[in-house]
Image (cartoon, rainbow, N blue to C red):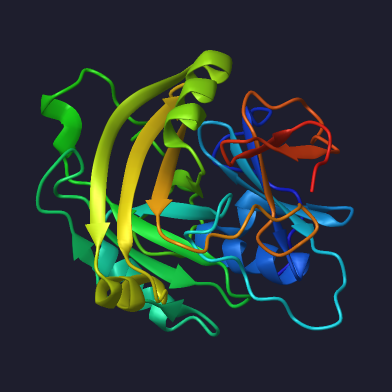
């Protein structure tokens, strides 16, 4: 596949940029473009980008060479990012992914029975280089609609050439944080974020093994926020032992969240005490 510049679902300067470190930029860009549409992706220098509607851009940058392949961080480790694709028919999308070389679809499709995300259906999958991604299908009326006037961004628009069946766009970018309250307070105060829902989740070890390939159990506090009616953020504070700290941007799983992004990507990043990696001086 040739990833040359072309029309994207939204041609505005990206308002929000999510940078993710991958072992092979060409492979990762091609992988995402094969799902979201060749027109969404292009390469510039050593980085790749995939654009989504509402001015959200995923930027892929290379990891530093290491002597041996590195395992990705666990979903519950501090600072870990996952990207979630919203679909209209999660069974069709998951079946498609099961046929993609190198992809591992984990566990079963889960339907949430109650609470602010009731009716929401989700499943995770592992990319060929090991990073976790998610599929999510929202019900026609979100579970939280009866308790708040706030709304997540549900107006995603896919590219015309998207290959993933029933793809609607990027549903959210998700993060494991050290302090949910501190992360929420920062995003509200500094990035015009609005809190849409909060909930508590408990998971047994067998469920975590099946759905995430993780041998842990515990409880999690979760919040979903929306920024500029364009990008949804999912934040988890996981009550599990042995969490690893955030990784720098030159290692697999390193990431950088730029909300209200400058035209040029930030050259440095810092790990905020609450767990997100944001523009600023590098700290390790």
Q: Which residue is painted at 53% across and 66% down in the image?
A: 74
- Left or right placement of residue 213 versus residue 82 in this view: left
Total count of labels: 0
Q: Does residue 230 appear in the picture of this structure? A: no
Which residue occupies 79% across, 31% down? 280
Q: Position of residue 284 (x, y in %)?
A: 79, 48
- The residue nearer to you, when weighing 83 against 237, is 237
Compared across the picture, whether 250 is left or right of 232 comes to right
In which quarter of the view is residue 186 placed? top right
Quarter assignment of residue 14:
top right
Q: Residue at x 62, y 69 (%)?
A: 72
Left or right: 49 as drawn, with respect to 155: right
Residue at the (24%, 69%) spot, across then down: 204
Residue 26's x, y, as percent?
76, 68
Q: Quadrant of the N terminus?
A: bottom right
Q: Is residue 200 left or right of residue 147?
A: right
Q: Nearer the viewer, residue 159 or 20?
A: 20
């Amino acid at each position: 596949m040739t990833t040359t510049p072309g029309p994207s679902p939204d041609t505005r300067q990206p308002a929000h940029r999510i940078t993710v470190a991958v072992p092979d930029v060409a492979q990762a860009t091609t992988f995402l473009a094969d799902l979201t549409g060749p027109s969404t992706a292009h390469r510039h220098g050593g980085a790749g980008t995939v654009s989504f509607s509402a001015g959200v851009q995923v930027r892929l940058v290379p990891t530093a060479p290491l002597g041996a392949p590195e395992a990705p961080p666990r979903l519950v480790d501090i600072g870990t990012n996952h990207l979630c694709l919203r679909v209209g028919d999660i069974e069709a999308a998951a079946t498609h992914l099961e046929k993609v070389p190198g992809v591992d679809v984990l566990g079963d499709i889960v339907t949430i029975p109650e609470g602010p995300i009731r009716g929401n259906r989700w499943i995770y999958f592992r990319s060929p280089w090991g990073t976790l991604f998610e599929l999510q299908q929202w019900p026609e009326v979100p579970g939280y609609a009866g308790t708040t006037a706030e709304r997540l961004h549900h107006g995603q628009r896919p590219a015309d050439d998207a290959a993933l069946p029933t793809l609607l766009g990027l549903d959210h970018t998700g993060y494991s944080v050290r302090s949910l309250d501190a992360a929420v307070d920062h995003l509200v105060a500094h990035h015009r974020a609005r809190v849409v829902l909060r909930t508590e989740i408990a998971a047994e070890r067998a469920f975590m093994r099946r759905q995430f390939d993780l041998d842990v159990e515990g409880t999690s506090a979760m919040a979903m926020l929306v920024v500029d009616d364009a990008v949804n953020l999912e934040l988890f504070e996981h009550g599990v032992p042995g969490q690893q700290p955030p990784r720098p941007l030159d290692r697999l799983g390193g990431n950088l969240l730029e909300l209200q992004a400058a035209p040029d990507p930030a050259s440095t990043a810092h790990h905020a005490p609450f767990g997100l990696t944001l523009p600023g001086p590098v700290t390790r």
